[in-house]
Amino acid sequence: MENGWRCPSLLICLLISTATLSGCGGIGPGSPNASLSSDRDTVNAGDSVNFDARASSSPDPTIIDEFKWTFGDGVTKTTKQGIISHVFEEAGTFDVTVEVFNDEGASDSASLVVFVNALPEVLLNLPDFVKTGQEARLDASNSFDPEGGGVEVSWDFDAHTDSNGDSDPLNDADASGAVTTLTVSEAGNVTGAVTVVDDTGASNTTLWTLRVISRSFRVIWEEAYLEYDWSGYLEQGASHEIQFLPGEGSRLIDFSATLTLSRDLLPITWPEDNFTLEVDLPSSGWSYGVITSQDNITENSSATIERTAMNPAPESGYTVYADSKEELEESLLGDPDGRFGQGAWYWTITALECDPDTPVDGVDPDEGNDWALDVHFVVLILRISEVSV
């Protein structure tokens, strides 16, 4: 009789044990069955992963009404939906778990592993500043992949302009390679971006700023004298034209021009020949003309045009800051208060009074005349030299 009672006792004990397991760990007829999947199991730091537990089930008539998510990086969330997205900010291997609960409080869990690749480290070596027109060396050669893979480097020289039109102003590939150079023509701060990509495609973009300062120059205006001369022969009514550019790279101050006629014979029985001398400066809107004359019968006829203080004499011997020598030179020579006489000068010499004289043996003894034009300028030549600081 004792043995007959032992079997019911063991069966009761087994039934009691089975009921206890079904309430924890998903073992039992009323427990849910957790299922977990993801759209990818390897990502880069900063990327998101989509997790899906909607395939989890619970026996009728129970339903799953809560999902508790543990992402392995210290973050947990509870949702009513079986799908969620999570961003892994740090690198490493993370065990992601979802625990599903039905409306009777029973639960089950499922897990998977996500590997998060570390972003490459960007290490830059830039000069504190460079001068305009000076080459700056940009060095990212110390950048590395924490997992030990190789890296590639690209440079964007303007973080404010989207030159490739993709709506991202930081990925315009203006240069590539761990080391590059940049030359800037204007003073100011230049902000760009450098992108380092590892062998798995993980990238890290870092902004950098280069300070560009103006260069310093010493400005000297050096006084100089320019001389020009022409000569020729003209008969009555004929003209000769001359065009030239005096004082290129300088400022004109004074000038004088003298036209002289060479007398062949003493004017005893015929009148003195005379020429006109005219000068025209279209760029300055100025022209002037004179007629030769003779003050003494022993001297040649002549005429003079002169003008002083055409432009003010500028300050000299000072230091100024500018982006380039060429820019400074253009600014100083282009000063609107000092441009009188710039451009082409047009001279016209005309035989005005070489009419037939009293003939000698039937021949006009002085049909025309030899002439000579001498022009003298006082100019200030611009000398610019860079000063080291």
Image: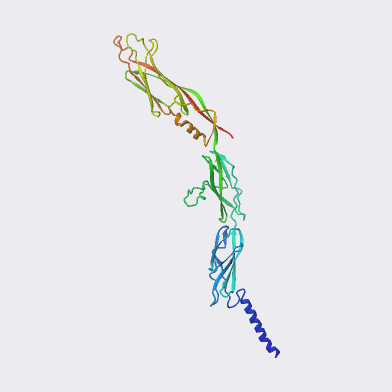
Residue 258, quarter of the rendered image? top left
Provide residue 343's location: percent of width, then percent of height: 42, 29
Whole-percent x, y for residue 233 in the image: 36, 18
* Pick the front one: 303 or 351: 303
Q: Position of residue 338 (x, y in %)?
A: 45, 29
* Quarter of the N terminus within the rendering: bottom right
Residue 138 is at least partly visible in this image: yes
Picture quadrant of residue 387: top right
Q: Is residue 131 above or below residue 346?
A: below
Q: State the count of labels.
A: 0
Q: Looking at this view, name the residue that lies furthest to the bottom.
A: 1
Q: Residue at x 47, y 24 (%)?
A: 379
Left or right: residue 267 versus residue 20 is left
Instruction: Tell me which residue sits at (44%, 31%) in the image.
Output: 336
Which residue, as the protein is rendered here, is positioned at the far left? 362
Please name whichever residue, 4 or 71, is drawn nearer the observer in this view of the structure.
71
- Colour logic: rainbow
**Is residue 297 found left or right of 224 in the rendered image?**
left
Left or right placement of residue 6 versus residue 175 in this view:
right
Report the side of 1 relative to 92 (left or right): right
In the image, residue 375 sits, relative to residue 111, either above or below, namely above
Q: Residue furthest right?
A: 2
Res. 278 visible in picture: no
Which quarter of the image is occupied by the C terminus? top right
Q: Height in image: 10 above or below 166?
A: below
What's the residue at 63%, 77% (across, down)? 20
